[in-house]
Image (tube, grey):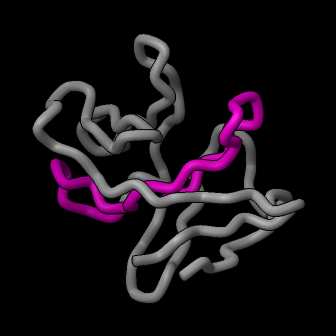
Amino acid sequence: MWNKICDVADLTPYQGRGALVGDEQLALFYLPETDQGVFAIDNWDPIGEAFVLSRGIVGDIGGRDCVASPLYKQHFDLISGECIEEPKVSVKTWQVEVRGEEVWVMSA
């Protein structure tokens, strides 16, 4: 099921924003120069064991758009959810669509 989360104008470029879909916490990231534009991953940092990824720093590691956890600085790929430093660890990614100026996320 698709859920409207917010408007693109509610997001700040290159900064995370937390959102709830049902009882799941997501971290949204708006990267306006990318084709996808908005990315959604779980807000849960499986290494630091806290809901903090929306507070991470967005960047690029080897051509991969990612967010660095504010706790232990591991980088999570915004497309695959894979932890770049520990590839066996990953976070869930969410399918996102920008419809006009609205951000929609697919829930399970």
Residue 1 falls in image quadrant: bottom right
Q: Is residue 7 left or right of residue 63?
A: right
Instruction: Please identify the residue farthest to the top as the structure is shown.
Output: 62
Question: Which residue is drawn at the image coordinates 23% and 46% (left, top)?
Answer: 90
Instruction: Please identify the residue farthest to the left as the structure is shown.
Output: 88
> In the rendered view of the protein, which quadrant contains the C terminus?
bottom left
Q: Which residues are magenta?
A: 27-51
| 56 w.r.t. 46: above or below | above
At which x and y percent is residue 67? 44, 37
Is 45 inside the magenta-drawn segment? yes
Is 15 inside the magenta-drawn segment? no
Question: Which residue is drawn at the image coordinates 55% and 72% (left, top)?
Answer: 19
Question: Which residue is drawn at the image coordinates 19% and 54% (left, top)?
Answer: 46
Residue 80 falls in image quadrant: top left
At which x and y percent is residue 70? 37, 43
**Image label count:** 0
| 61 w.r.t. 93: above or below | above
| 44 w.r.t. 73: above or below | below
Instruction: Please identify the residue farthest to the bottom as the structure is shown.
Output: 22
Q: Nearer the viewer, residue 62 or 3?
A: 3
Q: Is residue 43 left or right of residue 16?
A: left
Question: Which residue is drawn at the image coordinates 48% and 14% (left, top)?
Answer: 63
